[in-house]
Image: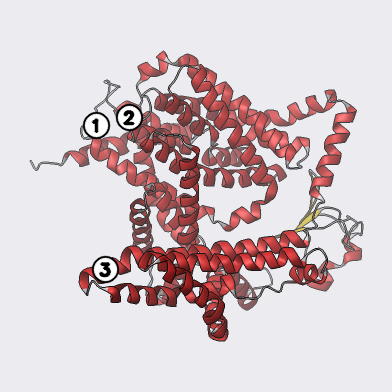
């Protein structure tokens, strides 16, 4: 009889147990994640009634691959542009909730007598809600179309991004074992720099590459390319000192902006499901049932902390962002659980040997408890709102209503805010690209030339010429390019108050350019050469070659913006070329308080006759009118196909 490798036997045991528990949990209408974890408990070393995995280290490697593909899939669904679309309400609510739960988790850990590192990881574990569990609950309860559901999804986007930051920060803290504020700030700045650099470079290069090779791409090649790009980014990110999960997430978010995003997500789904199942089974293998019994008290305590803490702080955050009381309470009661990211954070602590063994099974047990209670709490939110509304003083209700309405009607953006946003965008994007070129030139190109060609002054000169040639268009955009937006012109006309600060901003741009050029030249030559060369380049050379640099930068900017919005452009082109009479496109429009259509009936507006638009529903606060009649009036916002 031929010998079967132990790995195949272990995989057969893992996938067989996972398949059986999947069927059971599907029948019970419970999250499959908990089924996978139960399967891991059964085939793990702490449950002797069933056969046990022999080579746990190999399975752990497969589980690490599972984390990579889970985060890659999350990045495909994420898209950094969603951060702009979720709006201020989701951002404020999410940040309030996460900050409160991090502090609450740390204090609970300290109160239980746990170590500082256990307490820090506990705060991260209970801070992030479960996207899969919430979406599953909304599907089963038919709530995905409710107005508060959009706010919940926006908060989940914020949580996903913060969870990635938590993974990096906790990894840094675990390795350094130091909690100095300066090091944390430096880690955050380093992370922000590399995130921006990789995202800008990825959006500029990858969609263009995929577009130019589109005739050669089949489903098979697209799958291989996607996985290859994912793993290449994982290698690059780990070389920079970050986690592999971050690299997978970044590449997923870059590919999410391409025309192939949905197709890649569809092709990756079986791969993600397979390795994700192995990951969650490996999670269950680490659980000792005896520890769950031993720590039953902390499990119940932390479950109550998650349920009460999240419901209260999410509700408060939503109220602070200007949401009505009912919508805020529904949002808070929907996010009272922890899930997949909590497991990943707990696994990180174990893999780095910085947390106690009991923390991981406690996190899984708290997730199981809060997952089972989530649907009931969502159903309870509306009766609880009615109970609170009856007992809430009239003065408080009036105060909340006025605050909500005034917050949602603030739409005016000051000229200074617009100008500062423009300057910040120019400084950040161009500075990140320039610093990236400097690091590439001094850390890779210069050593390569010294090793392969010659080691002399000509090496530094050649490196400087190459670097400055690549930097020139971005230096021009950073320091020389004229900013003449409408807001800028409006402020400039007010000579008495605004010209001075605007001149300071312009001098700041020039000074930033000189510093960046000096940073490059100082590493290759003396400080004197760096200072003189930087001033000459910024003040004399760049203005002389303005026309050529402007054309070069315009081409770069045009390609980047096209790649960034390629999916929207493609959808518009397809709609204009092949839209049939029975085709429909759903769009959501917010009607401002100053609109001429406010208070008019649909008959008077005549949208169908004028524009070929049918009104599918009208929203007024928390009330939604489906298929409105001809005499319905427009007050808040409309969805139209």
- Determine crowd level at label 1: few under 14, some 14-19, many 20+ residues with C-alpha closer than 10 A: many
Q: Which mark is residue 312?
A: none
Q: Which residue is mark 3?
A: 448
Q: Which residue is mark 2?
A: 285
- Determine crowd level at label 3: few under 14, some 14-19, many 20+ residues with C-alpha closer than 10 A: some
Q: How many marks?
A: 3
Residue 118 location, x and y as percent? 43, 26
Q: Earlier in the sequence, mark 3 or mark 2?
A: 2
Q: Which residue is mark 1?
A: 53
**Viewer-closest of 210 and 521:** 521
State left or right for residue 395 relative to residue 93.
Answer: right
**Viewer-closest of 84 and 325:** 84
Q: Where, by quadrant of the figure, is residue 250 drawn?
A: bottom left
**Viewer-closest of 66 and 33:** 66
Is there CB contact under 8 Å for labels 1 and 2?
yes
Residue 256 location, x and y as percent? 50, 60
**Residue drawn 57% across and 38% down?**
134
Cα gap from disc 3 to disc 1, whole angstroms:
47 Å
Cα gap from disc 3 to disc 2, whole angstroms:
47 Å
């Amino acid at each position: 009889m031929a010998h079967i490798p132990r790995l195949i036997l272990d995989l057969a045991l893992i996938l067989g147990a996972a398949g059986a528990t999947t069927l059971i949990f599907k029948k019970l209408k419970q999250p499959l994640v908990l089924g996978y974890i139960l399967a891991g408990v059964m085939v793990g070393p702490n449950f002797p009634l069933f056969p046990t995995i022999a080579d746990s280290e190999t399975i752990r490697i497969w589980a690490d691959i599972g984390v990579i593909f889970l985060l890659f899939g999350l990045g495909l669904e994420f898209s950094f542009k969603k951060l702009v679309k979720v709006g201020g309400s989701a951002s404020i609510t999410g940040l309030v909730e996460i900050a409160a739960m991090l502090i609450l988790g740390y204090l609970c850990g300290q109160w239980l007598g746990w170590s500082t590192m256990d307490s820090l990881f506990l705060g991260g574990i209970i801070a992030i809600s479960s996207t899969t569990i919430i979406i599953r609950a909304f599907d089963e309860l038919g709530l995905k179309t409710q107005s508060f559901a959009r706010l919940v999804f926006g908060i989940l986007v914020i949580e996903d991004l913060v969870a990635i930051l938590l993974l990096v920060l906790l990894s840094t803290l675990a390795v350094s074992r130091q909690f100095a504020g300066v090091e944390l700030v430096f880690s955050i700045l380093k992370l922000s720099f590399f995130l921006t650099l990789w995202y800008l470079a990825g959006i500029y290069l990858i969609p263009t590459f995929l577009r130019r090779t589109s005739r050669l791409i089949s489903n098979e090649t697209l799958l291989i390319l996607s996985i290859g790009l994912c793993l290449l980014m994982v290698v690059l990110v780990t070389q920079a000192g970050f986690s592999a999960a971050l690299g997978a997430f970044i590449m997923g978010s870059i590919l999410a902006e391409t025309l192939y995003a949905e197709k890649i997500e569809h092709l990756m789904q079986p791969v993600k499901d397979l390795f994700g199942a192995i990951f969650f089974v490996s999670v269950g293998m680490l659980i000792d049932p005896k520890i769950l019994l031993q720590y039953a008290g902390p499990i119940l305590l932390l479950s109550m902390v998650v349920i009460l803490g999240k419901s209260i702080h999410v509700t408060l955050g939503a109220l602070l962002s200007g949401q009505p009381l009912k919508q805020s309470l529904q949002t808070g009661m929907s996010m009272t659980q922890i899930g997949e990211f909590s497991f990943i954070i707990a696994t990180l602590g174990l893999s780095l040997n910085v947390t106690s063994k009991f923390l991981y099974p406690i996190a899984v047990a708290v997730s199981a408890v809060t997952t089972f209670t989530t649907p009931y709490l969502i159903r309870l939110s509306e009766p609880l709102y009615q109970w609170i509304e009856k007992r809430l003083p009239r003065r408080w209700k009036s105060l909340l209503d006025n605050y909500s309405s005034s917050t949602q009607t603030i739409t005016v953006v000051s000229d200074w805010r617009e100008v500062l946003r423009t300057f910040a965008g120019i400084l950040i994007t161009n500075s990140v690209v320039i610093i990236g070129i400097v690091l590439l030139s001094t850390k890779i190109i210069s050593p390569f030339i010294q090793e392969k060609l010659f080691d002399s002054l000509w090496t530094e000169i050649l490196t400087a010429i190459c670097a400055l040639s690549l930097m020139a268009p971005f230096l021009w955009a950073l320091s020389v390019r004229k900013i003449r937006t409408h807001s800028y012109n409006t402020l400039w006309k007010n000579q008495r108050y605004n010209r001075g600060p605007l001149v300071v901003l312009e001098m700041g741009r020039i000074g930033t350019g000189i510093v960046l050029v000096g940073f490059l030249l100082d590493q290759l030559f003396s400080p004197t050469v760096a200072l003189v060369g930087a001033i000459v380049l910024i003040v004399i050379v760049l203005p002389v070659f303005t026309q050529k640099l402007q054309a070069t930068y315009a081409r770069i900017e045009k390609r980047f913006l096209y790649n960034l919005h390629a999916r929207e452009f493609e959808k518009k082109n397809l709609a204009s070329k092949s839209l049939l009479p029975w085709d429909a496109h759903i769009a959501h429009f917010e009607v401002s308080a100053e609109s001429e259509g406010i208070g008019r009936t649909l008959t008077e507006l005549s949208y169908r006759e004028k524009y070929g638009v049918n009104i599918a529903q009208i929203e007024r606060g928390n009330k939604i009118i489906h298929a409105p009649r001809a005499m319905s009036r427009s007050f808040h916002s409309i969805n139209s196909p």
